[in-house]
Image: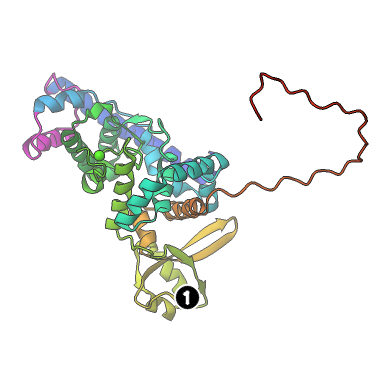
């Protein structure tokens, strides 16, 4: 990408080398398993062997159901660097927002928001999460439900990440178990479901464990359908945010002035999104909270770059942190907020046409009346 620094490229090269090493170790394990273990089991690593055992013994899956599935796994090592460096972690905010806030994106967003207003409103009324926030999340996740944006087979991604993404192996173990449970509960074919490179699925891009925990069958057809039921999708996103701390009618974030000791201010932002303090404590370190913010309100602080060369100090409220539970990134929560504000305002009216240029008027002479074409529709 054009914006990558040389440092980033070096890191990426390092990661690629590490990955190739990891993959070769993994391949050796695979080969060993193929030659020494069950000949039926094409795909197995030491980690997978223990996982399969757990799926059978603890979660009640049948070996005959599991083995053909695991044999189908295609390892996709190229997704690991993507998962390690998602765009929200690569860019300053003013660069990141430009990935979304383009004319086509917003036009699609305005139309989507308007078309789906009644159902979005219904979700807002039930969960207290504004409809424009729900729509903005879907915009950032899947370009307002653009079909075909998920490029991978979820089963391959989850197993690739479990096998190769060692830092997140425990996480992906849980996601494989959740995915199989989800498929069992909803009657889905595990091999037919698509996902992102990180294993997120459906229009709202939930991980399997999140679908099990937060997805709602809002249209009451007996299925939690995050692929094609807008009602299920909107209620699930709103439920997710509500259960992760969204406060109805609460603020998301505000810029605040700082006048205290720079070391204290630095300390206030060091902990990031989740290092919270009561607003009353912030005032003691020279952070000037506006009067309308209650002294007991829980806040955290970060800097971000709204434009090149400019750092803005902002106070984050529960609702900002709720959005980051969807994706732990300041950039992500900022862009969701910005998109939601634009959707809420609605599509700007087109500029008025330029005034007609004054031309010299020439008197018309012998102008015949226009002859009406009898075949033409009435004007
Ligand atoms: Ca449903």
Question: What stretch of residues is rendered in magenta?
Answer: 37-62
Q: How is the image coloured?
A: rainbow
Does residue 185 appear in the picture of this structure?
A: yes
Please provide percent x and percent y for residue 264: 44, 74
- Read off the residue under disc 1: 290
Q: Residues within 10 Å of mark 1 (few under 14, many from 20)?
A: few
* Ligand 1 rendered quadrant: top left
Considering depth in this image, is 294 or 275 the residue closer to the camera?
Answer: 294
Please say whether residue 55 is one of the residues in the magenta stretch: yes
- 294 in relation to 106, above or below: below
Res. 281 image quadrant: bottom left
Q: Is residue 280 left or right of residue 220?
A: right
Secondary structure at badge 1 equals loop
List the single residue furthest toward the left.
57
Please provide percent x and percent y for residue 234: 33, 46
Work out which quarter of the rendered image holds the C terminus and state it.
Answer: top right
Q: Is mark 1 within 8 Å of ligand 1?
A: no
Q: Residue at x 21, y 29 (%)?
A: 29
Q: How many marks?
A: 1
Please provide percent x and percent y for residue 15: 40, 39
- 39 in relation to 182, above or below: above
Considering depth in this image, is 317 or 262 the residue closer to the camera?
Answer: 317
- 89 in relation to 81, above or below: below
Considering depth in this image, is 338 or 31 the residue closer to the camera?
Answer: 338
Res. 275 image quadrant: bottom left
Res. 208 image quadrant: top left
Considering depth in this image, is 105 or 230 the residue closer to the camera?
Answer: 230
Does residue 206 appear in the picture of this structure?
A: no
Q: Is residue 264 left or right of residue 102?
A: left
Q: Is residue 24 left or right of residue 178?
A: right
């Amino acid at each position: 990408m054009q914006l990558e620094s040389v440092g980033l490229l070096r890191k990426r090269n390092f990661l690629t080398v590490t990955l190739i090493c990891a993959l070769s170790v993994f391949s050796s394990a695979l080969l060993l398993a193929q030659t020494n273990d069950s000949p039926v089991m094409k795909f197995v690593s030491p980690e997978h062997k223990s996982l399969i055992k757990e799926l059978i013994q603890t979660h009640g899956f049948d070996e005959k159901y599991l083995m053909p599935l695991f044999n189908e796994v295609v390892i996709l090592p190229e997704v690991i660097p993507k998962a390690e460096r998602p765009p929200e972690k690569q860019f300053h905010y003013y660069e990141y927002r430009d990935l979304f806030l383009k004319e086509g994106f917003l036009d699609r967003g305005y139309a989507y928001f308007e078309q789906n207003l009644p159902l979005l409103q219904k979700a807002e009324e039930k969960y207290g999460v504004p409809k424009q926030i729900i729509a903005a999340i879907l915009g950032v996740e899947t370009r307002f439900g653009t079909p075909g944006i998920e490029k991978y087979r979820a089963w391959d991604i989850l197993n690739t990440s479990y096998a190769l993404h060692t830092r997140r192996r425990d996480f992906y173990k849980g996601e494989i178990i959740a995915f199989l449970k989800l498929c069992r509960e909803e009657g889905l074919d595990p091999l037919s479901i698509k996902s992102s490179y990180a294993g997120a699925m459906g229009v709202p891009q939930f991980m399997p464990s999140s679908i099990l925990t937060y997805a709602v069958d809002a249209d009451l057809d007996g299925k939690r359908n995050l692929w094609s039921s807008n009602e299920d999708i909107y209620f699930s996103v709103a439920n997710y945010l509500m259960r992760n701390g969204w406060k109805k009618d609460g603020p998301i974030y505000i810029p605040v002035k700082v006048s205290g000791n720079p070391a204290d201010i630095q300390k206030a932002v060091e902990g990031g999104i989740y290092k919270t303090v009561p607003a009353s404590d912030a005032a003691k370190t020279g952070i000037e909270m506006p009067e309308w913010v209650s002294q007991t309100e829980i806040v955290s602080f970060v800097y971000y770059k709204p434009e090149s060369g400019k750092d803005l100090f902002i106070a984050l409220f529960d609702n900002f942190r709720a959005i980051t539970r969807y994706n732990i990134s300041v950039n992500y929560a900022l862009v969701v907020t910005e998109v939601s504000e634009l959707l809420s305002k609605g599509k700007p009216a087109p500029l008025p046409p330029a005034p007609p240029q004054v031309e010299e008027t020439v008197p018309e002479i012998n102008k015949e009346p226009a002859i009406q074409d009898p075949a033409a529709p009435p004007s």
